[in-house]
Amino acid sequence: MKLHEYQAKELFAKAGIAVPKGRLITSAGELNTALQDIPGPPWVVKAQVHAGGRGKGGGVKLVHSREEAAEAVEHLLTNRLVTPQTTAEGVAVHQVLIEEGVDIDKEFYLGMTVDRAVARPTMIFSPSGGMEIEEVAQQSPELIFKEPVSPATGWMPYQSRNLIYRLSPLPSPETIKELATTMKKLVDLFMQNDCSLLEINPLVITKQGAVMALDAKMSIDDNALYRHKDLAALDDSREKDPLEVMAEKANLNYIRLNGNIGAMVNGAGLAMATMDVIKLAGAEPANFLDVGGGASEEMITKGFEIILKDERVKAILINIFGGILRCDVLARGVLAAAKKTEIPVPLIVRLEGTNVEEGRKILEDSDLDFLVAKDMAEAAQLVAREAKRSVLS
């Protein structure tokens, strides 16, 4: 689960990590009151959306007067924001963060994530702050410094020194101490909140020598949210695709994609393979939908409803390997969904595994119009063909 920048900064401040003074507003009418509490000008106006690359898309603006601030707020709240990490349609901006301007001397990148190569939480530090860290890692890997966190000892003071003393020139002793303190607090925040990502880009040293987080990105492991009801309450469903919100409530794994082939599969690995064969057949999947190994008839029905709500879908492929989820349960779920919602597009079914004959018989004895595929390759060819016919008709 992603947090907005302003939400992450509130947690930063509680943890003792310095952040600029700011206010969140949801309308242009709140701006004058907000500016009374924030030192400036200059001020920084930031769109609060779950998308990276805001600066490149015009979502972060430095303003030097109240008039410029009003114009920036009005523009952001009334236009969709397109960044390198959004679709061409962009995303709606529902709120903006107004912050004080900061006199920056140096910029750094500081983040925490889980390094799968060493199977440990790992701190990443770089003197190339304010840039996309992926670009830095690709173009100048020598500027990426890492320190893994031992599960036995936790973060040790020498690890902060290992990172900081790779800088050239070195900051002042007071700033080194403040950087080390910030690193320790970031590790604690990451561990205490079951984060999958915690990022400050840039972390700056001001001209007054203070260390401050100018940006904040925070993602919580969804599987740990039951331990963090307070964080779960911060989830902003407006930032998600409505169909993904529906799937989340039904405990389904759904991701909307850009094609026109709806797919319902049990198991993440089989779902990935199914998307691959759809693409090999010359078509594009409209979604990733994994109903899981233990899906119930109700979950199957909900999965169908979600797929059919996507108007781009021109054909549906059901690819089920019956193990924990038996083929007869899937077949009954398909029929239940068909009774509740008319299926206006071609349906291709590939069943294999536990109770496969019973599942096929349930479908064959129904009045549901569908095609049966004997294997994945044929299923992909059939669904690609039917989708093309639907587009042309």
Image (tube, grey):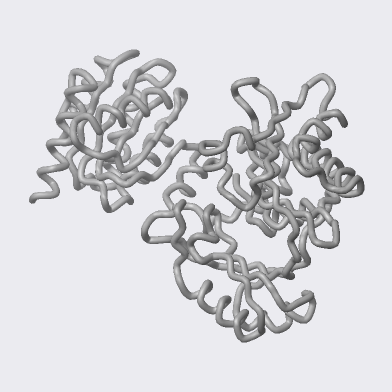
Q: In the rendering, at what x and y percent does residue 33 appear?
A: 73, 82
Image vertical order of residue 170 relative to residue 103, above or below: above
Observer able to see residue 331: no
Measuring 78% from the left and 42% from the top, which residue is drawn there? 186
Image vertical order of residue 267 relative to residue 335, above or below: above
Measuring 72% from the left and 26% from the top, which residue is drawn there? 148
Count all numbered tags in the image, as a single digit. 0
Q: Left or right: 122 with respect to 82?
A: right
Looking at the image, which residue sits at the far right?
A: 174
Image vertical order of residue 186 relative to residue 14, above or below: above
Measuring 74% from the left and 70% from the top, which residue is drawn there? 100
Measuring 55% from the left and 59% from the top, which residue is drawn there? 49
Task: Check the picture and name the quadrant holding the N terminus.
Answer: top right
Viewer-nearest residue: 35 or 253: 35
Q: In the rendering, at what x and y percent does residue 352 appear?
A: 28, 16
- Which quadrant holds residue 283? top left
Q: Left or right: 307 with respect to 79?
A: left
Viewer-nearest residue: 123 or 276: 123
Q: In the rendering, at what x and y percent does residue 117 appear?
A: 60, 21
Q: In the rendering, at what x and y percent does residue 140 appear?
A: 56, 37
Viewer-nearest residue: 159 or 320: 159
